[in-house]
Image (cartoon, rainbow, N blue to C red):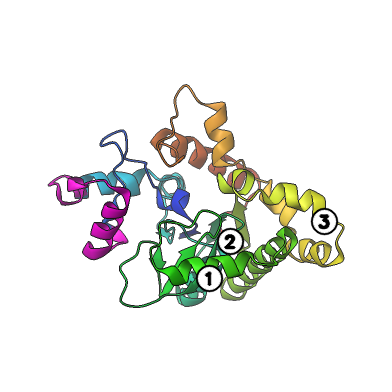
Amino acid sequence: MIYVIGDSFAWGDEVADHILPNFWGYKDQLSDNQIASRSAQLGILRPDVNHPLADAWDNFRIENRWSNLLAKHFGTDVVNRGENGKSIHGMVTTLSQDFETLKNADLVIVQLTGLHRLQIPYVTDDHEAFVQEGYAQLNPLVHLTFSKQVYFEIGKLRLADTTERDFLYDYLNCILLIRQLVKSATNTEVLLVDSLFLRECGNPEWHLNNNETNPYIKKMLDLTDFKNKIYTFPSMADIYNQNRNTCHTMVSGHYCHNTHRLFAQSLYDIIIRENMFPKKH
């Protein structure tokens, strides 16, 4: 079994948009109240959620996201824990709760997310999107359409007197926790996979180049082997930029089913070449 965790790229956001533009496939993540709230905030009516073919469109998204295509290449099952807006802290939470499932994984892939995203305990009696497992997923730089004032205040506190080095250290610390969690559950290593966000949202690569001589960052880089691990694989952005004639991006900057197909094939080739699957018992 392949276990995948990540944000909206792992979840497959906009994979079905060529069938119905701006179809987000809310059904497996949001309640009816959250759907209505999100639609009202965006000023968009989404009758597609109740469309008779909505399930078929959503199944297309699931079947054609890169994790499922990769699993088909290997002839195995896949557990996908990708969720829109998921922070690196949210991934630690999910992996902790999924410890028993991880024990059955032959391959664990983490598609990394933005540097500035964080999670906070969910404020009840509020119907917001990006609420996962009792936590709200926030990005204080863009204030992800959260209406409760407390979210904005927490976002501002997160940014106050916090340097990019602090964000980077925190991010790498979460990577270390993820690797330790997976290692304790199974004999496989974590494959860290880039998406769009590492290079274009928060840009950890730039901050690494400017902070890697700092003793705290250097120690964390040694512990995680982050720089070597992350550049083993191409990013979704690389795949898109190399194949613009067959791939397209939609309103949120996500990529189409062709991008996912090419990305899955690229991962498969590297995993086979490096003999990463199945795990060595």
Residue most extreme to the left: 52
Q: Is residue 132 left or right of residue 204?
A: left
In the rendered image, the quadrant that contains the N terminus is: bottom left
Q: Which residue is mark 3?
A: 212
Count of numbered tags: 3
Q: Disc 2 marks which amino acid?
A: Lys
The mark nearer the N terminus, 2 or 1, is: 1
Question: Residue 40 versus residue 225: which sits nearer the camera?
Answer: 40
The stretch drawn in magenta includes residue 30: yes
Q: Residue 202, relative to residue 79: is it above or below? A: above
Q: Which mark is on residue 154? A: 1
Q: Which mark is residue 127?
A: none
Per the image, label 2 sits on a secondary structure element best described as loop
Nearest-to-viewer mark from 2 and 1: 1
- The residues colored magenta run 28-54
Separation (CA) of disc 2 from disc 1: 41 Å
- Provide residue 179's location: percent of width, then percent of height: 64, 67
The residue shown at (49%, 63%) is 138
Dominant secondary structure of the residues highlighted in magenta in the image: helix
Marking on residue 279: 2
Task: Work out how far the residue at label 3 is from the one at label 2, CA to CA, in angstroms.
Answer: 31 Å
Local crowd size for mark 1, using a 10 Å CA cut-off: few (<14), some (14–19), many (≥20): some
> Where does residue 89 sit, x and y in percent of width and height?
56, 68
Say what secondary structure mark 1 lies in. Answer: helix
Q: Give neighbour class at mark 2: few <14, some 14-19, many 20+ (Cα, 10 Å).
A: some
